[in-house]
Amino acid sequence: EAEVAQSPRYKITEKSQAVAFWCDPISGHATLYWYRQILGQGPELLVQFQDESVVDDSQLPKDRFSAERLKGVDSTLKIQPAELGDSAMYLCASSLVESTGELFFGEGSRLTVL
Amino acid sequence: DQQVKQNSPSLSVQEGRISILNCDYTNSMFDYFLWYKKYPAEGPTFLISISSIKDKNEDGRFTVFLNKSAKHLSLHIVPSQPGDSAVYFCAASGSGTYKYIFGTGTRLKVLA
């Protein structure tokens, strides 16, 4: 069964350092999402791509976060510099365009900032 | 402003009984709703969806009910099984945007 791949699964870093997460969506899925989930809360949308274009990044803290999907396939989410409050699970999801809209999530990348 | 709310942080149910998880939303433009299950250290897994043109959708032990006038949906699990113990999230989107807003989740514990 096709899956959304994410790496790394776990990342521990010190504040002010740079960190990057990678996501490879299910083949053929044009829409890709990055969500952040803080413990005890629901996933919060950071950025949504349609192919290589950003559809929505209104909740992305652009002073320190950046996201790209250069060829419309895999995607990278970067944080620089990391802050203590960035500790969270970063979830990538993908979906087919013009489908039921179901999102398929990866296993997530757990970030701990010390 | 929390547009999608799950007011019960946790729920305990005996095995074999019905589990009812509730979700409320405030945005009348939402027209598509999803339920996800999440185990610790894993990504959310899709369970069931419902469009605003329906008021009920069933898939095996899972049924979702939508009350548009009350801006309320619920997920029924019958019969509940210990493997159903997880955190359940509802999510909503509007007008084909596929931009999903998630609730804060309800932790379900099914007791054997």
Image: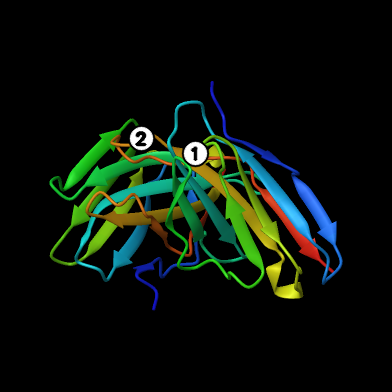
The reply to whether callout 1 and callout 2 are in contact (CB within 8 Å) is yes
Q: How is the image coloured?
A: rainbow
Q: Chain of mark 2?
A: B
Question: Callout 1 environment at 10 Å: few (<14), some (14 to 19), or many (20+)?
Answer: many
> Disc 1: which chain?
B
The front one of B70 and A18 is A18
Farthest residue to the top: give it.
A1
Residue neighbourhood size for the residue with mark 2, other residues' Cα within 10 Å, grouped as few (<14), some (14–19), many (≥20): few
**Image quadrant occupied by the N terminus of chain A:** top right
Give coordinates of residue A58: x percent, y percent: 45, 67
Q: Which residue is mark 2?
A: B61
Q: Using residue B68 as the reference point, say whether residue A78 is left or right of it.
A: right
Q: Whole-Å distance between the Cαs marked 1 and 2?
A: 10 Å
Secondary structure at badge 1 equals loop
Q: Nearer the viewer, mark 1 or mark 2?
A: 2
Q: Is residue B1 left or right of residue A82?
A: left
Residue drawn 80% across and 53% down?
A: A11
Location of residue A30 with respect to B76 vertically, above or below? above
Q: Nearer the viewer, residue A79 or B18?
A: A79
Specify the amino acid type for callout 2.
Arg
| Quadrant in the picture for residue A67 | bottom right
Outermost front residue:
A70
The residue that appears at 48% across and 40% down in the rendered structure is A94
Q: Residue at x 49, y 38 (%)?
A: B81
Residue pictured at 63% horizontal, 44% vertical: B42
Q: Is residue A7 visible?
A: yes
Viewer-proximal residue among A12 and B67? A12
Quarter of the image containing the C terminus of chain A? Answer: bottom right
Q: In the rendered view, does B26 fall on the left or right side of A18? A: left
Instruction: Report whether B15 appears left or right of B98.
Output: right
Q: In the displayed structure, would residue B110 be above or below residue A88?
A: above
The residue at which mark 1 appears reads as B81
